[in-house]
């Protein structure tokens, strides 16, 4: 089954072609045009500017995805598109493009929740090793039931997934998402947006003992998260200093990363234990963090749990994950009924 995916929920414009084969998905093309360089200058995304860039990128990205996969619109079995959550102007670019294509080609249109898309990046078979335990050289799709951590710029959610398309929300964030915490703390340190990858790089040479930031809700009997206190703790440290030298920047980066990773890993492991689940899956932009992946890999192998994470380039926003979600949950909706929903949740 050949599916075109379209993703424009935030600052990226993505189009991808995948081929579904039983319990995994083969990537034929995955094109992502980013307006990040523009947002790095402004320290964050300006929605109107993001959408305008997406209007420019959408058709060339679509054409490139088809060309690279050596497919035409006629070859498609379905068109999948992110319909929420996200920025309304951005979502509309993808949704209206997909609806037009569905109308013209009469192909099935499958609206996909962006967060569900992130989770389904775990089923895409790439050459990068994704199955951390058991350590196999070939691709293994995740098994059910699984505890899933979706950790991105907009969300930090823990879910129980018993089968394809069935999610039980165990807890979300009460305030800032983990990626948002990375980005806001990065801004305090004068780092460009998005700050997650840069904080990870700086943390490598940071002193783990100089600062210790709070681990919010770590020991409380809840699967909810809260990261805004962490940002405030960093702000207090920064306000005490006249200037932030490079060593301080590295040490704060290290303490930030240690706090975020510890909360994410421990809460996810506890959710797996409480629900008697042997499979853990992570997804979303923050799942690209090598440190987070290694921490999960180490602890899950000690506990004989299976751990899955998508290839790093499929953790951040892309259209292949949207097409993958549509393949496993092939529920077409007539095109006039598909509308963008910026507030969509699980
Ligand atoms: O999933 P995503 O691309 O967009 C949303 O749907 O939000 O996630 C973007 C987030 C940003 O907050 C970014 O700082 C974070 O993922 N991120 C990372 C890393 N790479 C991206 N955070 C920590 N470490 C990384 N290596
Ligand atoms: Zn995302």
Image: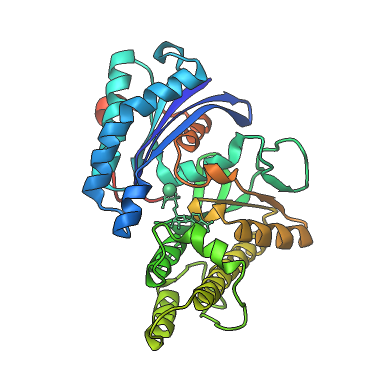
Image quadrant in which you'd find residue 290:
bottom right
* Residue 271 image offset from top left, x and y in percent: 60, 63
Q: Is residue 4 above or below residue 247?
A: above
Residue 340 in sight = no
Q: Position of residue 153 (x, y in %)?
A: 42, 56
Q: Relative to residue 266, is residue 209 depicted above or below? A: below
The residue positioned 29% from the left and 15% from the top of the image is: 104
Q: Residue furthest bottom?
A: 240
Q: Residue at x 62, y 61 (%)?
A: 291
| Residue 302 or residue 61, whichever sits in front | 61
Which of 114/319 is in front? 319
Q: Position of residue 304 (x, y in %)?
A: 78, 57
| Total count of labels | 0
Would you say 44 lies left or right of 155 here? left
Q: Which of 280 and 64 lies nearest the eye of the viewer?
A: 64
**Rendered residue at 24%/27% (across/down):** 336
Specify whether residue 79 is in view.
yes
Query: Vertical placement of 96 versus 44: above or below?
Result: above
């Amino acid at each position: 089954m050949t599916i075109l995916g379209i993703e424009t929920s935030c600052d990226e414009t993505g189009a991808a072609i995948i081929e579904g084969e039983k319990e995994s998905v083969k990537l034929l093309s995955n094109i992502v045009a980013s307006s990040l360089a523009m947002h790095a200058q402004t320290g964050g995304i300006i929605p109107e500017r993001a959408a305008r860039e997406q209007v420019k990128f959408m058709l060339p990205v679509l054409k490139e995805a088809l060309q690279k996969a050596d497919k035409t619109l006629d070859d498609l079995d379905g068109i999948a598109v992110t319909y929420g959550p996200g920025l309304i102007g951005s979502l509309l670019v993808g949704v209206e493009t997909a609806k037009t294509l569905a109308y013209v080609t009469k192909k099935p249109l499958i609206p996909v929740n962006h967060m569900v898309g992130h989770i389904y990046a775990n089923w895409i078979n790439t050459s990068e090793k994704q199955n951390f335990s058991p350590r196999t050289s070939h691709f293994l799709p995740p098994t059910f039931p699984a505890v899933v951590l979706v950790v991105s710029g907009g969300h930090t959610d823990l879910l129980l997934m018993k089968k394809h398309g069935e999610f039980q929300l165990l807890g979300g964030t009460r305030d800032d998402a983990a990626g948002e915490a990375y980005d806001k703390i990065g801004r305090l340190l004068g780092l460009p947006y998005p700050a997650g990858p840069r904080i990870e790089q700086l943390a490598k040479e940071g002193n783990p003992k100089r600062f210790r930031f709070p681990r919010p809700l770590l020991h409380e009997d809840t699967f909810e998260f809260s990261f805004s206190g962490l940002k405030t703790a960093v702000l207090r440290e920064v306000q005490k200093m006249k200037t932030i030298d490079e060593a301080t920047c590295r040490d704060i980066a290290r303490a930030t990363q240690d706090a975020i990773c510890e909360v994410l890993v421990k809460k996810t492991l506890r959710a797996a234990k409480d629900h008697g689940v042997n499979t853990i899956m992570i997804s979303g932009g923050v799942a690209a963090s090598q440190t987070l992946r290694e921490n999960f890999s180490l602890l899950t192998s000690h506990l004989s749990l299976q751990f899955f994470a998508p290839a790093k380039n499929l953790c951040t926003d892309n259209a292949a994950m949207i097409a993958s979600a549509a393949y496993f949950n092939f529920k077409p909706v007539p095109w006039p009924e598909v509308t963008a929903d910026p507030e969509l949740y699980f």
